[in-house]
Image (tube, coloured by chain):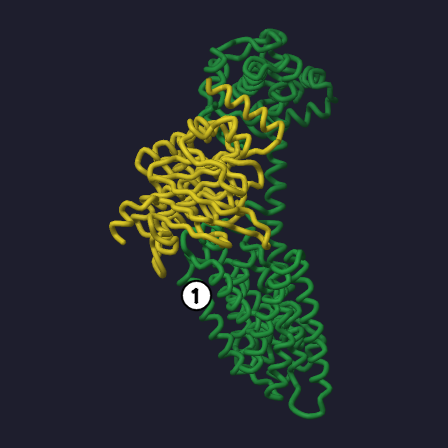
Amino acid sequence: MDANTVTAPPLEIHDLSVAYDRRPVLWGIDVEVPAGKLVGIIGPNGAGKSTLIKACMGVVAPSGGWVKVFGEPLDHAHRRVGYVPQRESVDWDFPVSVMDVVLMGRYGRLGLLRRPGAKDREIARASLDKVGMLPYANRQIANLSGGQQQRVFLARALAQESDLYFMDEPFAGVDAATEAAIVTLLHEMRDRGKTILVVHHDLPTARNYFDTLLLLNMRLVAFGPTDDVFTYDLLQRTYGGRLTILSEVADAVRQRG
Amino acid sequence: MPARAAKIGEITDIAILEQAIRFFSFQDPTLRFAVAGAAMMGIACGVLGTFLVVRRLALVGDTLSHAVLPGVAAGFLWGQTKNPVAIFVGAVVAGLAGTMVATAIRRTTRLKEDTALGLVLAGFYAVGICLVTMIQRLPTGNKSGIDKFLFGQAAAISAGDLKLMSAVTVLVLVVVVVFYKELLVTSFDPAFARATGFPVRLIQDGLMLLLAFAVVGALQAVGVVLVSAMLITPAAAAYLLTDRLRRMLLIASTIGCGTGIVGCFLSFLGNSLPTGPIMVLVASVVFAGAFLFAPRHGLVVRWVKARARHRRVGRENTLKALYHVLESRAFARDGVTLKELALRRRETLDDADRQAKALVRHGLAVVEDDGQLLRLTSEGKKRAAELVRNHRLWELYLTHAARYAADHVHDDAEKIEHVLGEDVVWELERRLNYADTDPHGKRIPTLAEGQARTGRAVEGVPPPEGGVP
């Protein structure tokens, strides 16, 4: 088992299916993500992108198949998994400070009955500093802009000190400066050996941001290095016959030059 | 001394004082039980209510509290008497059954949560009322006290009730202190909590169980109909008073505790009026106070701030008008007459007089010549130059950087000039290459005229993220 966990891939998804109210959303997904990859999960609306990462983390229950994280079932590997949910998924009027939210990243390591200590606070502060939000540590989260909220979520994920990260639309509704900062951060994390899966909906930028793409439309269309996968043919199969998107695809492919 | 209590109908000051002495000396064991019970339930309800409010589960609390009534009646029937333990068990079971039915309806049909809760609330409550009426008509058994469960009567709290209430309150406090971290993360971000490995469902169920305990404990004092108000109202007031969960818990339980005691006292004064409605009234008054006067979210405070801002903008516009008058004659003379000011702003002399007085009050100008001549103080000059400078810089920025047409930028600048902070002005200057003429050909006042500008933070506008793009 030990030898297995050393060489095991960060994420192995086998024949994963998910259904909401018996309506299938994902069908038989098979993916093995190698270590140190920055993976963009790309697909049209309703393709099941968020569902896929939620199923990987046990937030939604799969109707079939299994997921292994570093060779182990998820229940044994929560500490090695970090999560950045969609910004809209929480109530930003909630009475907590920026620091409180980032400290939640440490909770998974504390276990029952233990409270965050000085070391956890130090890690939380360092994480906030990395995303340029340290000056806001004592603010209530309601006073933040969209980009700042996203940075706080990223800081919380950094504080988790995980090896495998799932991020749900981290670029949605953020300003250009934040988007650039997030991209830099993601590349830096990848270069330190982290594996990151990012749900992304903007096709033109996907090619520049990620080294690996997972094309999804309820089933797996393709998974591989961006240069191999970002082709007109595969994108067309992912997005189906939607004309506006097809022309966008055509433009994006042409730009590759 | 106790003789006067009978005449409570015609309350005089002396009677109130005597009653107060009798109340606060706690000679009466009934009264001791009542106050201790109400205060403890206020604390437990305040703490749990806080979690209901931040989790947006207020309706769940309402439903649960009404759903316990059939259980109360069943517990009563079981022992044919007011046995606190039987009633407690019956009520908790009924309350949890109610929430489970609501969950089942939501999960298995297309109906949404509010509808499911409404259905359960009404259905269970109707069953409860029927049972209570039946019990009251039973020929046998001691049925006294069952009606008290509807509107609450703290005076009916027995030693047995009090033991249960203490147990519930201690349990609630211990659980919330021990599992604070778990309750916080599952309340704020359940998906993240789940991904981190927290048993979100279990924690939610545990919270519901505690809630059922607290509701049932509080029934005796507040009654089925209004117990949800003791959950929601103190917590809602606390929500307006702070934006940290810890403090909110503290404030809500303090309000709950105080409300319980004051409610008991008023009910006692009013010759045993039902305690429930009175306690809820007291809590509502506290909420109204928070609604109006909370330091940051209060209506009155927000209104006062808005008015102060409005007045400041008014003064600043006067300063600007004065600057324009001075500028129009190339700063030849220092003083501006009220008439000149009125002409410039196209207003009456009365308006100009009022505006002049406002400036004088704030040390921005002095009046001479029997109030007819207005002269800016050095502070006033500085501020006037700053405003004109802000206005013209912003216009220039809009026409240059944002490519607005020159005749579109004035209104925008009229608003922005009042909120531009020093840092932003510096940045604007740098970006505009220290230009000295605005899009309409007017000169932008220099730093010397604005002189050592005092740092004024931008109000209402968040600082740009990661530098101006």
- Percent across and percent down for residue B329 are 62, 7
**Residue B62, above or below A191:** below
**Nearest to the observer: residue B4 or residue B301:** B301
Residue name at image x 61 percent, y 54 percent: B289
Residue name at image x 63 percent, y 12 percent: B406
Q: Give me the chain that's green.
A: B
Residue name at image x 64 percent, y 24 percent: B356
Q: Is residue B332 left or right of residue A76?
A: right
Residue type, label 1: Val
Q: Chain of mark 1?
A: B
**Residue B467, above or below B114:** above
- Percent across and percent down for residue A109 are 34, 53
- Percent across and percent down for residue B135 are 69, 84
Residue B439, picture quadrant: top right
Q: Which residue is mark 1?
A: B175
Please identify the quadrant where the N terminus of chain A is shown: bottom left
- Percent across and percent down for residue A77 are 35, 52
How many C-alpha atoms fall within 10 Å of the one at disc 1: few (<14), some, or many (≥20)? Answer: some
Q: Colour of chain A?
A: yellow
Q: Does residue B29 appear in the picture of this structure?
A: no
